Amino acid sequence: MPNYRTLRDPNAEYTMRDLSAETMDLSADRGPRDVEITDVQTTMVDGNYPWILVRVYTDAGLVGTGESYWGGGDDAIIERMAPFLIGENPLDIDRLYEHLIQKMSGEGSISGKVISAISGIEIALHDVAGKILELPAYQLVGGKYRDEVRVYCDLHTEDEANPIACADEGERVVEELGYDAIKFDLDVPSGHEKDRANRHLRGPEIDHKVEIVREVTERVGDRADVAFDCHWSFTAGSAKRLARELEAYDVWWLEDPVPPENHDVQQEVTQSTTTPITVGENVYRTHGQRRLIENQSLDIIAPDLPRVGGMRETRKIADLADLYYVPVAMHNVSSPIGTMASAQVAAAIPNSLALEYHSYQLGWWEDLVEEDGLIEDGRMEVPEKPGLGLTLDLDAVEEHMVEGETLFDEA
């Protein structure tokens, strides 16, 4: 993947590497906050998801790191946006965010890969702004309600359709890793399907899903909250039947039981049951989440910060949800960078419920940064260091890069 050293003047005879130390220093007549963006670079890491890392470089010698949601923020989109950032002050986060939204409107900046790419840049801007101002990122989005964020662990087994195997893994993670909040997939094959394409659940299929819920909640329900994810898999009628069957069990939430497009159907499903329903991962920006919240089509909202629009946009969604007394459980499949960005916002909002962690089976997740012990006993401490409070380990990034990618420049 190319690095983007596009300067404001594309006809200039020099590049970033040619700038002298004197040129890079802030001159005497400039204040410490008079900083300019000089470069934007990306690298994709081959994790349990493809993690698209974004770095924003400045003439103050400070670099901010962000992350775009997997499947979004590819090099062509970042390359398209880089000229809109070069020469701008990275402290103007809101203005730059709206500037990118407007400039990228032709590419579809209200959703999809474009807004995910913008999210990665926006996170990087918060990181570098915090370093310039010598403030942790949570201070830039409102200050702190809590010193640590509760983390729930998304679990998987080799035999994901086996209720006993699920209960065994849930118990192991609770006892050995210290989590008191976990989640399992519920859109797993039961062996009773006739036609999975029609989204309809027959009685034996519902019985199988209820059995998974029963085994897991009975095994660890007194020690951990347990949620179940359906990945938008079922018809409205099947979702309502399943949710009603689960009312007898201590289910933390049932996530995304119906496809995400029709919010009227989502409202009907949610209001038909006392089983808590969580949605929001597959919806973009505050505008996308608004009807879900205002129509009370959910019990818990689950925005994905590196996908939904970044740190400020997630804060806006949380504020809107708080008007309706709805808690926030952020979806998250990110590297330590995107995860910490989510934790910084979760620390700054009153209605944070928990933050997802999706990489417990990946032994080198934490190796991407120099800091240790990011998640301990199901909690993520929010650092007091400037910006996100993390330092990329470029050797580890290079080791795990997607083939053909180019490593970032050092700061």
Image (cartoon, helix red, strand yellow):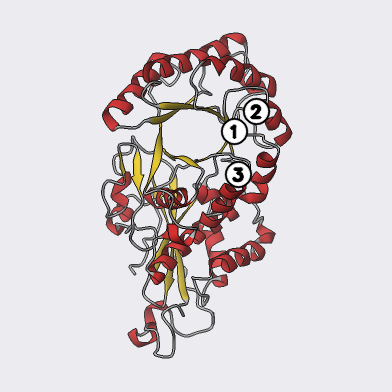
Q: Quadrant of the C terminus?
A: bottom left
The mark found on residue 270 in the picture is 2
The residue located at (53%, 83%) in the rendering is 11
Disc 1 to disc 3, how far (Cα)?
10 Å
State whether residue 32 is above or below residue 401: below
Residue 200, visible in the rendered structure: no
Q: Dot 2 surroundings within 10 Å: few (below 14), some, or many (20 or more)?
A: many
Q: In the rendered view, does 371 fall on the left or right side of 234?
A: left
- Kindly state the secondary structure of the residue where label 3 is placed: helix
User: For the residues carrying marks 3 and 2, which lies nearer the camera in this image?
Assistant: 3
User: Which sits in the foreground, 67 or 107?
Assistant: 67
Disc 3 to disc 2, how far (Cα)?
16 Å
Q: Residue furthest top?
A: 204
Q: Position of residue 69 (x, y in %)?
A: 50, 49
Dot 3 or dot 2, earlier in sequence: 2
Q: Quadrant of the N terminus?
A: bottom left
- What residue did someone put label 3 on? 321
Q: Position of residue 391 (x, y in %)?
A: 32, 59
- What residue did someone put label 1 on? 299
**Image quarter for residue 271?**
top right
The residue located at (53%, 14%) in the rendering is 248
Q: In the rendered view, does 407 fall on the left or right side of 104?
A: left
